[in-house]
Image (spheres, rainbow, N blue to C red):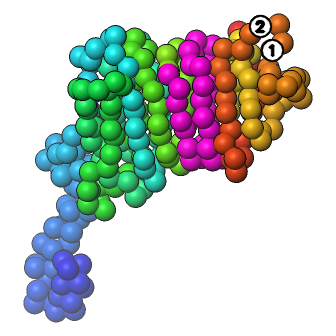
Amino acid sequence: MPIIIAFYLSRKSKFENVVTYLYIYVVIVLLFFPSAYFFKLDFLTTYSISSKVQVEEIESNSEYLVKVDTNGIINLSTFKNLGYSVDIINRPGKVGYPQVIETLVGNPKALLIQEIDTSRLFQVSGWNINLGNQNTWKLDILSFESKFNLENISLNSSKIAGTGEIILGDNLIVDEIFITGSYKIYVSENLPVVVTGNAVVPSDWINATIGFLNQTEEVYKTKIIIEDGSQVELFNLKKEN
């Protein structure tokens, strides 16, 4: 609107001073708000909403079910401590800010991570989830174009559905992982696994009666179960020197 007014008044010579003031106003607006956004000033509505949920005080001897069902991206990783954190992936998307509902009764206890009804101006591409390696977790996650970095974490039987990448590291402790969807799975050369179901595996894996084995000299520690209709390809993840 100021630009339209300035353009109109620019044709009126007697309003030259008014035009000058309006141009100054427009320049201030166009420079001030991008600068404020760049420096993340708190008065902007964008930064007045807390996006991160972080909890450190949870029981170390309890199992927690992490249940997520979203149309967005989930980047899941681990850290050395108790607890968990959830934050936004600060890129444009169609997913609202996350909220965590924690149940304190039952076995396992549960973390239900779900979407808050969020204005389209604040919607993001997904969430970053970090889980402490001093807890035992059970995953039940549906997401798309996601990345799960499962390194140095203890899991009970878990389910991952959707699309994306999964990294199974050296120190992963889990008996069974059920995979549904389209995934690329990178398996550490130090983690003995067996894969059952329809999957494409590296040429050096052994096709045994119980499934595909990445190691024959050791008993497998993790069973990867590929559900019917899924498209999964596995790769060797070599340890960096």
- Lateral position of residue 53 relative to residue 129, left or right: left
Placement of the N terminus among the 4 image quadrants: bottom left
Of residues 169 and 20, the one drawn nearer to the viewer in this rendering: 169
Point out residue 45 in the picture as x, y percentages from the top left corner.
18, 52
Q: Quadrant of the C terminus?
A: top right
Q: Indicate the quadrant where residue 105 lies.
A: top left
Reply above or below: 132 against 138: above
Was residue 157 drawn as part of the magenta stretch in this picture?
A: yes
> Residue 66 in the image: x percent, y percent?
40, 32
Mark 2–mark 1 Cα distance, whole angstroms, equals: 6 Å
Q: Which residues are magenta?
A: 156-183
- Label 1's element? loop
Task: Examine the rendering and report whether any part of residue 84 can be seen.
Answer: no
Q: Is residue 19 above or below residue 219?
A: below
Q: Position of residue 144 (x, y in %)?
A: 53, 49
Confirm or deny contact between disc 2 and disc 1 (CB under 8 A): yes
Residue under the point 85% across and 25% down:
209
